[in-house]
Image: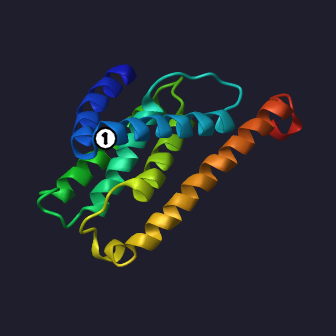
Amino acid sequence: LHIFTNLVSQTMIGYTCELHWGMWRMFSFYFATAFGATLLSCVGSPTSVSVGASGALLGIIGAYMAWILLNWNNRDLLPQPCPRMCTMLTWLFIILMIGISMEGIDNFAHLGGWITGMLIGFAFNPSSLAISWIEKRKETLKVTFTILSFLFFTILIFCCFFIVSCGVQCECWR
């Protein structure tokens, strides 16, 4: 069920995002969110090993949600923003419920991918006619989210090195 949900979600959401962003932005976002998902997974559950594309998928959902908000009032680019956002929230809910209800699913990777996607989505997605409260602060938000993205990756990388040097036998994990 989990693999099937990932396959359908990646096909539907990935295709839509690639149409709007282009191949290189989609490629960059996909691998950046996969990296963020992996880092949070390493920090959140250092004793487990996980594989899969769920973190990157949740990252693309997060980046797409940011893109929708950044282009909310541009009806040429985004004719129906509310149904699209509701669809993304529904996919997010379904994937998170599957993650909670089944054993062996790395929810830290899901969370890490979604957080990374939201951060880099607000930082690096193009914006035209955003929601009014974003439009007024667009440049400030882009700079803020760029800094937050950098801090997020830096802190997670530092924590991963700490975990590797300390080891899972360290007292801090008990």
Q: Secondary structure at mark 1?
A: helix
Say which residue label 1 marks. 91
Q: Residue at x 35, y 44 (%)?
A: 61
Q: How is the image coloured?
A: rainbow
- Using the image as rendered, state which of residue 116 and residue 76 is in the foreground: 76
Q: Please identify the quarter of the rendering in which residue 122 is found.
A: bottom left
Q: Is residue 101 above or below residue 88?
A: above
Q: Is residue 82 left or right of residue 164?
A: left
Q: Is residue 108 left or right of residue 10?
A: right
Q: Which quarter of the rendered picture does the C terminus lie within?
A: top right
Q: Which quarter of the rendered picture does the N terminus lie within?
A: top left
Q: Position of residue 123 (x, y in %)?
A: 44, 58
Q: Position of residue 39 (x, y in %)?
A: 61, 37
Q: Can residue 20 be seen in the rendering of this structure?
A: yes
Q: Residue furthest right?
A: 171
Instruction: Please state which amino acid type lies under the numbered disc 1.
Output: Trp
Q: Position of residue 140 (x, y in %)?
A: 46, 72
Number of marks present in the image shown = 1
